[in-house]
Each structure stands twice: as C-alpha cells, then as structure tokens.
Image: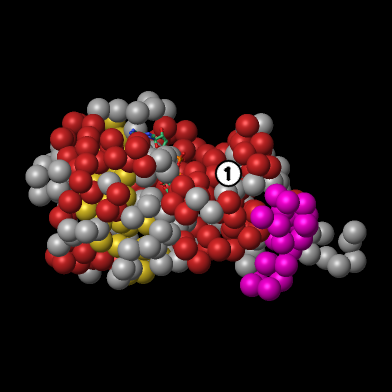
Amino acid sequence: MNNPFEKVTVVGAGFLGTQIALLSAHSGYKVSIYDTKESAFEDTYNRLTTDFKNKKITPAIPWEKWDDLKKSITFSTDPAVALKDTDFAVEAVFEDLEIKRKVFKMMGENAPAQAIFASNSSSMPISRMEDASGRPEKCINTHFYLPLQGMYMTDLAGGSKTLPEIMEKGDAWIRSLGCVPLRVNKEILGFCFNSVWRAIKKQSLYMWGNGFVDFRDIDRAWRIFSKMPIGPFGFMDTVGLDVVYDIEMVYYNDSKDPKDKPPEALMQKIKNGELGVKTGKGFYTYPNPEFLGPDFLDPKKK
Ligand SMILES: NC(=O)c1ccc[n+]([C@@H]2O[C@H](COP(=O)([O-])OP(=O)(O)OC[C@H]3O[C@@H](n4cnc5c(N)ncnc54)[C@H](O)[C@@H]3O)[C@@H](O)[C@H]2O)c1
C-alpha cells in the first residue's frame, strides 16, 4: 500500500507521541517530533524500551530496527523547524483542552497551508479544537491505543467541517501504519472503543476508590474472564495515572455528574507522585509488578 503523503510531524514526545513517531518512521514516513522539553524524546524512548523489556513485550517494530528509526527522526524544540514542509501533524500533548487549543493554533501558524492536523486526544472530539487551527476543514481525531504493544487499532473521527477527502487521508495514514481504523460517524466523547474501555475503567475506579474491593481482585477477575495478561489497574499504570485522571475529568466536566468524578484516592496517588510505570509506582511497583509474578492467579497461594 502506498503512503498517502511524505512527512509526519508529531507534537509532544511523551508516551504516545514517541510511539506514533517510531511507527510512522517504520512505515516509511519522514518524521519530525517537537516538544517544549529538550530531553522529552530521549527520556521517553529510554523509558519505553526499558518497560517493554521488563515486561518481555514483543513490540510491533522488531528490536533491531529501533535505534536506526530513532536516529532517522528529527527532534526539535522549535515548532517552525519541526513543522517545516510537513504534510500531516498529529498532537499528543497533555489531555487538557486549553493546551491542545494552543497547540492547534501554533500548528496553524507554522505548518504549510495544505497540511492536515490530527489530535491523539483520548476523549475530546476535534470540534473542540478545530477552529484554533485556522483550518477546521483539515482537522481530525486519530486516537491510537498502545500501537507498539499490539493494540493495532485507531479511532478516526471528523469535526464539524472536516472534508471527506481529509477523512480518507486519515484512514489511509492509519492503515499505512498497520492499524485498523475505527470510524466514528457521530460525535461522542471517547470515540469508538475508548468510550467502552472508559465504562470499565470508571466502575473499577469507583469500586476501589470507595473501598468495596481490593484493586488486585478486579485485575484477577478481568484476567481470568478475558484471558488478557493485564487487568484494568495494571493497564492504568501503563497509561499513567495522571493521564487517566485528566481523561476522567474531561467526562466529569462535560456531564457534571458526581458519579463521573474520579475518586479522591486517585488524586492522592498523583499527589504522592505515584503515576504508574513512569515513576516506578502506581497501583503496583515497577519494574517487577506483583501481577507478573507466578502467584498472582494461583488459587493455592494466599
Ligand atoms: N498514555 C496513554 O496510554 C495514551 C493512550 C492513548 C492516547 N493518549 C493521549 O495522548 C496524549 C498524550 O498522552 P501521553 O501519555 O503521551 O502523555 P505524556 O505525559 O507522556 O506526554 C506528553 C508530552 O507532551 C509534551 N507537551 C506538553 N505541552 C506541550 C506543548 N504545548 N507543546 C509541545 N509539547 C508539549 C510534554 O512535554 C510531554 O513530553 C493525551 O491526549 C492522552 O490522552 C494517551
């Protein structure tokens, strides 16, 4: 399959931005990456490789290609450099509407007029950012899950003015990265699958945060039920508890329903610096979390 364009720029060199950049380079795109923090790309790359190796994950990109791909990606803290001649800019900065709107404005000022803009937001429809870009007809949501860890699916949604040909370019880009596009026909927070995952996450947090159960038992149940190697709390540690909190707040700010507010206990963990894999402690302790141990699902071990 031919790639639909040549150059991809990723804005935000965190956990997801770095994965999108590596996957794009692996699929033959010229890739640049921009972050306000000088060490962001290097730090995230090192954290990703360490975490994957600790968890014995076989990544979607073979290990022997990683270093060369990293070298092929141009990192810059100057948006004009990173966005020069780009065809497609995708932002993966913090899950905060005001920050994302500023980034869309910045992309509009620095990228060529024909460039397409995408958001990797986990929850917010593109219609909330599109006008800041100055080119709403070229804006889409492309929400990746954990593309290098085997979750090869991506939500794809348009905004209030997105042109059909821009949706098709987004579809072609997602497919060229080896991901399955999950197309959203009508605007909804959380898109196609994240809204489903969110229902599981919300109830799991509620059960733990209000003292009904130990979080480990929800993870045990989920793993026995689904045959997956990780439960909701282990997965939230992977995502980052600060990121989970921000996403939950998007739903709460939208509905103002107290049942949508993340539990205080989650905020307490964040205040303690327990953000999950990235800080070495979240619900579990890393690099050797209890759920990877041989006893975790053994009924004979108490
Ligand atoms: N963590 C996940 O598993 C996951 C999965 C899917 C989608 N997402 C979404 O992807 C986005 C990023 O999440 P993440 O986990 O990669 O976050 P992260 O905290 O790992 O990285 C965010 C990066 O954005 C940079 N940044 C912040 N403001 C910036 C700005 N104005 N300009 C340039 N760079 C800026 C930060 O320095 C940081 O490097 C969020 O919208 C999140 O909801 C996250």
Foreground residue, 29 or 232? Answer: 232
For the record, the magenta segment spans 206-227
For the point 35% across and 36% down, the residue is: 99
Residue at (68% x, 73% y) in the render? 225
Q: Is residue 223 magenta?
A: yes
Where residue 168 sits, quadrant-wise, is: bottom left
In the rendered image, which residue does mark 1 sit on?
A: 241
Residue shown at the point (17%, 51%) measured from the top left: 136
Amino acid carrying mark 1 in the image: Leu
Which residue is drawn at the image coordinates 63% and 32% (left, top)? 271
- Report the image quarter containing ligand 1: top left
Describe the element under mark 1 as helix, strand or loop: helix
What is the x, y in percent for residue 114? 10, 49
In the picture, residue 61 is in which quadrant?
A: bottom left
Q: Is residue 147 in the magenta section?
A: no
Query: In the depicted view, which residue is nearer to us: 36 or 255?
Result: 255
In depth, the one of 37 and 1 nearer the eye is 37
Q: Is residue 138 above or below residue 101?
A: below
The vertical placement of 274 against 176, above or below, is above
Q: Is residue 176 at least partly visible in the picture?
A: no
Q: Horizontal placement of 136 versus 258: left or right?
A: left
Label 1 CA crowd tier, 10 Å (few <14, some 14–19, many 20+): many
| Quarter of the rendering containing residue 34 | top left
Q: How many numbered circles does the render carry?
A: 1
